Each structure stands twice: as C-alpha cells, then as structure tokens.
Image (cartoon, rainbow, N blue to C red):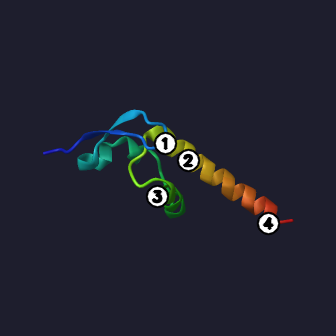
C-alpha cells in the first residue's frame, strides 16, 4: 500500500502532499540536493518541506556559500 500524507510545510505553512511511501514520485525528489545542502536544511527544519521552500532554501545555501567564498578571498 502506498503511503501518502498531507503535511504543512514548516517554513511557509502551506499544505502539500508528502509521498514518503513513493519517494520516486514525491515532490521533494524534484530537488537535487548535495549532502551539504541536505545538512543545511535538516539543521533548520526537522520535517519535510514543500518543493518551493526546498528550492528556495537550496538557493539560499548556494548564495551563502558564494558570499563566504568571496569574503574569505580578501
């Protein structure tokens, strides 16, 4: 039996469908995360995020890393 559940995103509070029983078709599988990005998200949130917030936070992480590399190079 496929397990799906409705969840509220802990960041934006919007309702979305988590397909933990069918991870290959879950909305979160559309966002490719490096191990560092995954750690960045898990430090801030302990539950599933919606696709939009996961995408935004991944971009935020990349921006922070770029900023750090630029400020450390001076």
Q: Residue furthest right?
A: 74
Residue mark closest to the camera, 4 vs 1: 1
Classify residue 67 as left or right of residue 44: right
Q: Residues within 10 Å of mark 2 (few under 14, many from 20)?
A: some
Q: Quadrant of the N terminus?
A: top left
Mark 4 or 2, nearer chain start: 2
Q: Residues within 10 Å of mark 4 (few under 14, many from 20)?
A: few
Mark 4 or 3, nearer chain start: 3
Disc 3: which residue: 42
Q: Quadrant of the C terminus?
A: bottom right
The reply to whether callout 2 and callout 1 are in contact (CB within 8 Å) is: yes
Disc 1: which residue: 11
Residue 34 is situated, as x and y percent measured from the top left of the image, at 51, 59
Q: CA gap, disc 4 to disc 3?
A: 25 Å
The reply to whether callout 4 and callout 3 are in contact (CB within 8 Å) is: no
The reply to whether callout 4 and callout 2 are in contact (CB within 8 Å) is: no
Residue mark closest to the camera, 4 vs 3: 3
Q: Residues within 10 Å of mark 3 (few under 14, many from 20)?
A: few
**Which residue is drawn at the image coordinates 53% and 58% (left, top)?**
40
């Amino acid at each position: 039996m496929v397990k799906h559940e409705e969840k509220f995103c802990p960041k934006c509070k919007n309702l979305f469908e988590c397909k933990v029983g069918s991870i290959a078709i879950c909305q979160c599988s559309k966002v490719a995360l490096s191990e560092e990005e995954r750690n960045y998200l898990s430090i801030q949130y302990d539950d599933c995020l919606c696709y939009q917030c996961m995408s935004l936070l991944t971009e935020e992480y990349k921006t922070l890393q770029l900023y750090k590399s630029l400020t450390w190079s001076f």
